[in-house]
Image (cartoon, coloured by chain):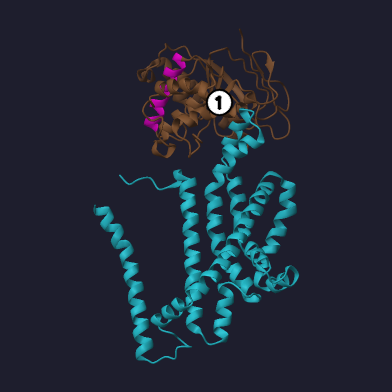
Chain colours: A brown, B cyan
Amino acid sequence: MEKTYRTRRGDLVPAVEGITLDIAENEFVTLVGPSGCGKSTLLKLVAGLTPVSGGTVRVRDTVVREPFPDVGIVFQHPVLLPWRTVLDNVLFAAEMLGLDPDDHRKRALELLELSGLAGFETRLPRELSGGMQQRVAICRALLPDPTLLLMDEPFGALDAMTREELGFELLRIWDARRKTILFVTHSIPEAILLADKVVVMTSRPGRVARVITIDLPRPRTVELEFDAKFKAYSDEVRGLIFASRRARADAR
Amino acid sequence: MRASVRSLSRSAVPAATLAGAIVVWELASRGLRIPKFIMPAPSEIAAEAWEWRYRFLGHTWVTLYETLGGFALSIVVAVPLATLIVYSPWMRRAIYPLIVLLQAVPKIAVAPVLLLVIGYGEFSKVIVAFLVAFFPIVVDTATGLAATPPELLELSRSYRASALKTFVKVRFPMALPFFFSGLKVAITLAVIGAVVGEFIGSDKGLGYVILSATSYWKTGLAFASMILLSVIAIVLFGAVCLVERLVCPWLAPAAEE
């Protein structure tokens, strides 16, 4: 089975332009780039939340024209429903999809346990820390077992330590339940540490500067950050982003 | 233990202040020999109220149901209006200016005309109460409905949930805190609306009692009616707060640890 996205969008106010991207099934792909490079727009295009103005988006050879249920979305903020318990927030996905929540209860509990939230099922979101709330949001996205997980700077609002912790947590979950993940981030180390492939984007209009295949062993560990290869990757990404900035500054 | 002592002293201080003020008032009006029709002493107000207790019951009931009728009507009208305003940009452009215009017209000025048109029965007071109460509910509910985090709406869209489902499960509950703050303002306004209606023309209700009592120099009765009106407003306000706490328990401040 092969999974392909082809996204092309231009004209008007070009948020992203001339983007061609192929992503294989179960690949962990991170999108990294400066603010305003259209990373989030790209995710919305893939999710079918925004129509493309040119080109096509394909998921498993089906052209995406509207939102489809086989996708899970995690945003920068957890956006949980404050009146629902942790468990009911996870089951929200099933309810909204028109499925019977009772059939998904067992899976929801498993997911919560997998993300270290066992014992918190009946708590309300406000009783949880930001990091825990974001774990609940991830469980909600994973509940219908989507083949594709779209994450829009999911750890962007968290402190650096929680961020790192959740990154490895996500890798662990991903190991247990393989999915294709498209993960937007501002953080270069995060992009490299998590990904099979890093898509470096430049802004105005958003373009893909380079797709870098990350050849680092899995499972990934914190120590990798001191690896020479890691350093080389991160220099490469940084170089691409700053080169585009310099080019723009010169043009001005 | 310590917390309960603290909360007791918290309510004891204002209670003692109030009791002190009443005592000072009593002593002053006795000592200074202020005529009863200008400033009755608390004991005289209480005596007159007691004498009138059965008649007060009827009048209080009338004002209460005029208030509640207007309040209920304003909820029934305001929530769909707010929903229309938020969901349809066209309706927003069509309705919103009219609502603001209606709010800008002083209701006290409208009330005599309204009574002329509708008649002098209780229903006209329900309408006046409704007119003053519905504005804050429309505005607050519309604000609340519009304040749904866009991510939640996108999420609902990605689940391909219907607009109705999104409204029932996400948007409306999200707007509840706003809705209730509108209700809290509206309930006290509804009391004022009912009394204003009674002032214009009626033969029942606490507003009527105040008017007729003052025209017969029975100031004590007027004071008693005022106190009863305040009690109604406070009790109704408290009731709205109670309902809010029951409906939205997640809004209660987290238990101090």
**Residue furthest left in the image:** B1
> SS class of the residue under badge 1?
helix
Q: Which residue is mark 1?
A: A94
**Residue furthest front in the image:** B54
Give coordinates of residue B138: x percent, y percent. Answer: 63, 54
Q: Is residue B161 magenta?
A: no
Task: Please indicate whether residue A11 sits to the left or right of residue B151 in the image.
Answer: right
Task: Tell me the kind of residue under disc 1.
Answer: Ala
Which residue corresponds to the image point at 45% horizontal and 34% vertical from the top-left?
A85
**Range covered by the magenta-colored residues:** A160-176
Which residue corresponds to the image point at 44% horizontal and 14% vertical from the top-left?
A176
Q: Residues within 10 Å of mark 1 (few under 14, many from 20)?
A: many
Give coordinates of residue B165: x percent, y percent. Answer: 62, 35
- Image vertical order of residue B254 relative to residue B137, above or below: above
Characterize the magenta stretch by its predominant secondary structure.
helix
The mark tally for this picture is 1
Q: Quadrant of the C terminus of chain B?
A: top left
User: Looking at the image, can residue A243 be seen?
Assistant: no
